[in-house]
Every structure is written in C-alpha cells, then in structure tokens.
Amino acid sequence: MVLGRAPLHPTMPTASNGTVSLYYETDGDGETVVCLGDVGYGAWQWGWQHAGLTGPFETLVTDLRGAGRSDAPPGPYAVDDFVADVQAVLDDHGERRVHVVGAGLGGMVALELARLSTRPRSLALLGTAPVGADLSLDPLFGSPGDPDELASSLAAALSRDFLDANPDVVERIVEWRAAEDATREAWEAQAAAAEAFDVSDRLYEIDVPALVVHGRDDAVWPVEYGRRLAEGLPRGEFVPLDSGHLVGIERSREVNDRLFGLFETA
C-alpha cells in the first residue's frame, strides 16, 4: 500500500474546450495512461496510481471541469461535456490512443469516450456504474473550507479499517481536498452529470478490454453496479476487493498490479 501522494510532475499545461480552460499534468514515458477523477475530487486522488505507473507509462492526470485548477463554469454539467474536455486535453497533448482509468464519474466519462471514439486502448473502471439515477452521492461531499466536514465525509469514501489504520494519510487527504476539491456549486454540477448518465443498454458498443474494480464495502456506488457493468461489457472483467469506494487508494498495490496487466496485454 502506498501511504502518501507522490508529488505530480510540474509539467502543467492547459487545454481549452471553447471558453473552458482545463488543467492537466503529465509525467513519465511510454504509452499514455489518462486518469479521470470522481465527483468533486482534485488530482490528489491519483497520487497512488501516479507513483505506481509513472516510468513504464506516461501518466496524464486532468482535473475535470469544476475541480482543481480547471475552470468551473455554471452547471449542470453532462458526461458529454467531460468527454469533449478529455478530447481537447488529448488533442493539446498530441496523443491519439491512450489507456483510460476512470473513478466514479470519471469511469462514466471513460465509458462514453470509448463508445464515441477509438481513442481508448483499454478501460479501467474503479468504483463506477453504468447508470447513475439511483446513486446517492451527497455523503461524499465536503466543503473545501471546512476541514472537519472534509474529514467526516471520508467515512463514505474509505473503509473504517483504512481510516483507523492510517490517520496520517487521512490528515494529508484532508489538506489536499481543501486545496483541490470542488465547491458545493461545482460539485452539484458534476454530480448532476453522474446522476443523469445511463449507458446500460449500450455497453455492447464498447469493445475494448475493460477492467472493472470495485470495493465490496462501497457505501455510495454499490458493488453490484460494478458487477453489472462488467457483465454488460463485451470484454469486461470484474475484480471485487475488500475496500470502500476509493479502491485505488485503499488497495493501491493490487489495483496497480491489475492495471499493469491490463495495459501490457491491451
């Protein structure tokens, strides 16, 4: 387990989708792995994958509109908006074919990117779902200006075992969230995109290798959603792990090993 966020590399260009400026960071060499984050979270959430993948692969981490250092135009947003944003980032970076890792909302964006384009070589979908209508995302929100709320809202994102065993990591996550996470208004704009998303009857159109990793104890995105997602994807593989929602943090070593296997065979 990696117990800290590795600093991301200071290669920090921005791309533009119309009037929306989109921040991204890159590091490493080799085939590009794009990381697309969950509702409201900044780039901090990918520190564990950045540390594990960078070198053999180039990692590209982008803040979704509304979070981090990307613009936060008025919402609500739609998954199609995020797909267009990702296309703009990839065009700016000059990459055509990429591996895509998405968590939660970012997984939905990855699914739609793969359905609408040939850019993804593979998909890794962490704690995500093919439909968002029945999700109750609000427990995940914490106001960036309220450290106590940021800390308490982690109870919906991480397992009690992890929280109790890693107080130093929790403290650092709260600091990163305060600096990078979305405001309430932007969070609601992102959450609206997840809640309106439904690709459940079109999964057959996504014919790339797809790894679906889900925490068995995910309190917000239930594990059964991940199972349904993998079953509906023509080349889907379902991997449940003992974890809460942020499985890429709690079980980073296992997740990174699975990602290496996916990328090397896709």
Image: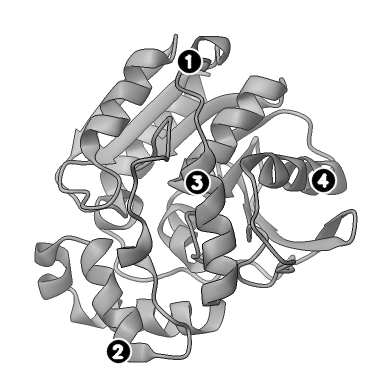
Mark positioned earlier in the residue sequence (1 or 2): 2
Q: Is residue 257 above or below residue 194?
A: above
Quarter of the rendering occupied by the N terminus? bottom left
Q: At 36% across and 30% down in the image, what residue appears?
A: 212
Q: Are marks 3 and 4 in contact (CB under 8 Å)?
A: no
Q: Residue 142: image x %, image y %?
A: 39, 77
Q: In the rendered image, is residue 71 in sight? A: yes
Q: Whole-Å distance between the Cαs marked 2 and 4?
A: 36 Å
Q: Is residue 106 above or below residue 67?
A: above
Q: Nearer the viewer, mark 1 or mark 4?
A: 1
Q: Residue 213: image x %, image y %?
A: 32, 35
* Res 210 → quadrant: top left
Q: Horizontal placement of 39 versus 155: left or right?
A: right
Mark positioned earlier in the residue sequence (3 or 4): 4
* Res 233 → quadrant: top left
Around disc 1, counting alpha carbons within 10 Å, would you say few (fewer than 14), some (14 to 19), or many (20 or more)?
few
Quickly name the residue at label 3.
194
Q: Residue 107: image x %, image y %?
A: 49, 39
Q: Which mark is residue 148?
A: 2
